[in-house]
Image: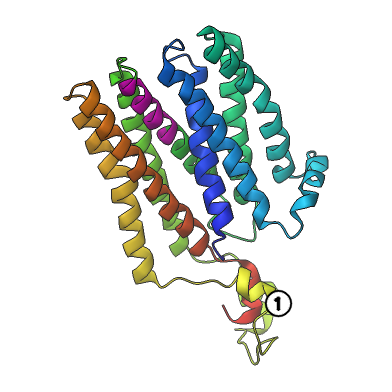
Amino acid sequence: MHPAYSIIFFTTSSGLGYGLAAMLGLGLLDPSSAWVKFAHLLALALISGGLLASTFHLGNPQRAWRALSQWRSSWLSREGVLAIGTYLPLCIAAWFALFQGRHLPLVGLLGTAGAIATVYCTSMIYASLRSIQAWNTPLTSACYLLFAGAGGSLLAAFVAACAGQANWHLALIAILLLAAAWAARIQWRKRLSMAPLSTPESATGLGHLGEVRLFERPHTNENYLTREMGFRVARKHAEKLLRLALVAGGAIPVLLLLLSLLLGQGAAAAVLALAVLSHALGVLVERWLFFAEARHAVMNYYGG
């Protein structure tokens, strides 16, 4: 699949935003702190920026609102409806934190539930596609949810360090979620080496006659399908990029989280800022690979 930069940014930014919003909704940070007030605004900014970026992938962005009408059958529509609905508790929570320094437990839990549900719907846009075998697994949803939680808890640990609050519990949560996220991602990648369910024989319905070989391509030039569905990345490059993503998005943040527990407030905040940046870079590379390594069944008709 062709990696669309707008979708890569959308899934990365909104995942971090919803992860941070979920942590704030659980009341793990003191809402009277200026840094925690800033965290509420940061979560909303990351979510809004990601959702806005997602419209750039549409042929007619001005018609994006029409996607909301198909919520009964479309995961994309459900994601949009939930994203809009989740704004209400998140904005209410941000308002009370900003102007009254209070955390509302019920509103916070609604925001956390909405954030989790929205990320799940985002993941199901891909996990529900049977035409892309690697995506069509519960591991896809597990990866999206775990990465959102890991990034959100990492951001929450950074905010707590800046605010001078105890952050060892947030650091522990972040380490556990980072380990779980990358373990799920590595397990997910094993699906790429599975025997394909869709083959030229099954795609053409001629398998009963024997092996099907491409005699001539349907098109002499590239078209939309070959551009969007036929993108391929060399395996050796994919391996290098995966190692980069694993180190930047997992190993370095974990080491920096452990280091932050041994440092004072100022140094810990600086170290955790580097951990957040490193993790974001790793997730960007991981999301690029998520699309670049996926194989669409339609390429059976093009000899792919």
**SS of the residue at dot 1?**
helix
Residue 167: percent from the left, percent from the top? 31, 19
Which quarter of the figure has residue 219? bottom right
Q: Amino acid at mark 1?
A: Thr
Residue that protrudes farthest toward the bottom in the picture: 215
In this picture, which residue range is highlighted in magenta? Answer: 150-162
Determine the residue positioned at 83% across, 41% down: 69
31, 169: nearer the viewer: 31
Instruction: Locate the N terminus by quadrant.
Output: bottom right
Q: Is residue 206 left or right of residue 96?
A: right
Rendered location of residue 135, percent (x, y): 55, 54
Residue 88 visible in rendering: yes
In what quadrant of the picture does the C terminus appear? bottom right
Residue 23 in sight from this viewpoint:
no
Closer to the camera in the image, 146 or 268: 268
At 45% across and 36% down in the image, what residue appears? 146
Nearer to the camera, 228 or 40: 40
Q: Residue furthest left?
A: 262
**Mark 1 = which residue?**
204
Dominant SS type (magenta): helix
- Residue 84 magenta: no
| Circle 1 Cα neighbour tier, 10 Å, few/some/many (<14 / 14–19 / ≥20) | few
Q: Which residue lies at the image location 27% right of the left edge and 37% below the top edge? A: 254
Identify whether 249 is placed above or below 217: above
Q: Does 223 appear above or below 275? A: below
- The x and y percentages for residue 224 are 68, 73
- Above or below, comparing residue 92 to residue 123 in the picture: above
Q: Along the horizontal axis of the image, is 271 left or right of 42? A: left
